[in-house]
Amino acid sequence: MKNIYPGQSTGFLFSLILFIFLFAPAASQEIPIGTWRHHLPNRTVISLAEGNNNIIYAATPYGLLEYDKTYNSIRKIDKVDGLSDFGISVINYSKDKNLLLMGYQNGNVDILQGNQIFSVSDIRQANILGSKTIHNILFSGNIAYLSCGFGIVLLDLTDFVILDTWFIGPDASMLNVYDLAIKDSYFYAATEAGLLKASADAPNLADFQYWNQVTELPVPWGTYNNLAVHGDLLFANFSAGQTDSIYYFDGVTWNTFAPQTQESFFGNKTNLHSSNGYLTVSSDGGLFVFDSGLSLAGEFYFYAGEFVDALDALMDSDNILWAADNRSGLIKGGLTGGFESIIPEGPSHAESFGLAHNGGALWVAPGSTQSGIFNDRGIFVFYEQKWQTFNRWLFPEINSVRNIHQVTPHRGNTRRVFAASWMGGLLEFDVEDGLINFYHDENSTLQRRTGAAQHIRVGGSAWDSNGNLWVTNSNTDLFLHTLKPDGTWMGFPHNGNLGVNEIVGKVVVDNFDQKWVALPDGGGIMVFKEESLNGNQAFDIRKLGTQEGNGALPNNRVTALAKDKDGYIWVGTNGGVVVFYSPQQVFRSQSFNAQTIIVLQDGFAGRLFENEIINTIFVDGSNKKWFGTQSSGAFLLSSDARETILHFNKSNSPLPSNNILDISIDPKTGEVFFATDQGLVSYRAFATEGQSQHADVYAFPNPVRPGYAGYIAVKGLVTNARVKITDINGNLVYDTFAEGGQLVWNGRDLFGNRPSSGVYLVFSTDPEGNETMVTKILFLK
């Protein structure tokens, strides 16, 4: 059981607080340290339910939306707030029990009752082959009947325990049950093998022999996927691809439901829903509403400026029509129209492959470098708590561009980034203006892929100390290019070090302006250093691999590169992580090897992450290392990577997946963003980027109110500052070092006690003692 509560605020202020703190910089848009939030789309709503107290519930693939009709407000509830998982498939509300039940694609069940969430994982954990998806939920008395991919599960609504499972296929076999209804003391089950019927008075409905095929239907065999009891009638939808048919039973015969509508009624029906005297029929091309006498009360093919693509709909107790739309979110309107689309803030799509945060905005590249993927979503940006998409529909000049997969912040303009496309070239975007430049083979030295003229494969980009942007280019003669500050380009050959089909990946520039290029298909690393960029194309190049004396990599599949605060080059491979501590020696020493980090795990010594595939490495403001793995989640390790500080995975955190594709950090707040194959999530960590001077220093929360037990932070400090906290009389309360540019304090003194009410002074100084600063924190007890 978990508790969730809506946000609360208090108005307790007095003149001293106002005088000292009221005009301090606010951090209202920042999540607290140690907390999570998801950045997932809300445009697809799949299921609806009307609750008590003027609440409408709407399920998305990523969580739950709760709309309060009294205040016209909406809040999101997801895994951060206590839901067990992602992938809700259906919801239903029991007004008798005052609870919302959520079924998941993997068989999980969550129950929201008041401010508590209860989870039931029996179905998910059951040893059942095949689908465990919960398709629909029927309430009757104290039991919830769950229509599942294998049968019917009975859930007790008092103790939230599984009471029974009905396998109603032939010889008690598993059968995909899409929906269940009760009519005239009979259960009706819509299944992939037709409509089945059983007496509710049967002694043992777990016995398949009590379930019989309804052969009186016009089409007795095939898939029936939706049922609804509307007045004295039972409706059943026969699913036949794009030409579904609805039949209804009046207690004597089955009839075809074929109302006269402006456009064809015979399409793909997604849901039948009877509520408050109205029957709604949802489809991918229209929404139809019928009253208690089956007269057509409304038909809609457009709402809120979009074509109807409804997955569910209901008429609530106030005669407000609600629709769950596949593209337009939660729709609110009436029988005469007046529709509005309600979509809480979020990215337009869930895909996230490459990330970059420049201190002002987060950029998300949704593409891929995998063959056969042609992602045309463009690029997403999260700026001032709003999401925006820049794509080929907004900018037709990039109509042919696909798979934007990597982002590099602009070196001199925090509004702009460069984005690498695996099918198109290099693009420059502005946070508000969108596309600024598009570089391809006609206006740069970038080349098209050999043998596939439509492709320009850009693997990544990085800046050198002179403001040159270095760009990798796969399957061409020129594997590395530079865009100089004057706007001109130069391209450099690989001198036979690469095969025609060899992929060139990300690039990192070290403190000596040497370019380290990953070769993820098994080529190791290419290190490049030009003599000059003044027309002289002389350069040094060296290819490092697994050979002793020439790299000593654990594996030639190099998947991640990063430079840390000490200038070391960290390398992630399919066989672990190694470090080049002296990158300046790469062209000076004939024998040049990476160093292996040996760690203890389960009592055995081994190479760091030797059994993991490393997708990404990111260095935080305190020189600690974040590692994103393909199957084990995200790790935060100490600066030397010998100590594990944090390990997040799908089981112990709100991560939607253990496949971490990329990591980036807001340098100002320390919020860590994780791109996964199931969407984007972030965690507010300790470290921010430090500075050479104190700037915009403030503490939050400030004042610290009674009952607050979270972390207290002071931002804007010099890098790795020494920080002392004293009371107003100079008595030492706390003594520590900043994490990069931020102090994080647990609110306890040196003896573990919460300080008394009063003003506390924070003294910060750089390691040399030259740069100092004092700020205040007010404690209320």
Image (tube, rainbow, N blue to C red):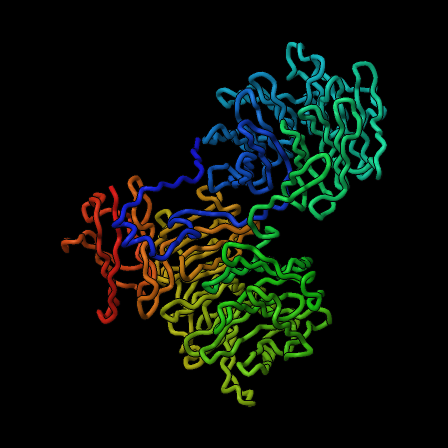
Which quadrant would the C terminus be assigned to in this image?
A: top left
Front-most of residues 525 and 666: 666
The one nearer the camera, 107 or 702, is 702
Against 756, is 553 above or below?
A: below
On screen, residue 320 versus residue 411, left or right, reads: right
**Where is residue 214 shown, x and y percent of the image?**
79, 19
Q: Quadrant of the N terminus?
A: top left
Expressed as whole percent of the image width and height from the top left, the position of residue 382 reads 53, 57
The reply to whether residue 395 is visible in this rendering is yes
Residue at 43% across / 40% down in the picture?
7
Is residue 752 among what the camera can see? no
Residue 669, percent across and down? Answer: 40, 57
Query: In the image, what residue occupies the spot 50% across and 61% down?
Result: 361
Q: Where is residue 201 in the image (x, y as percent from the top left)?
A: 66, 10
Kindly give the residue lying farthest to the front in the view shown: 15
Q: Residue at x 57, y 76 (%)?
A: 480
Image quadrant assignment for residue 636:
bottom left
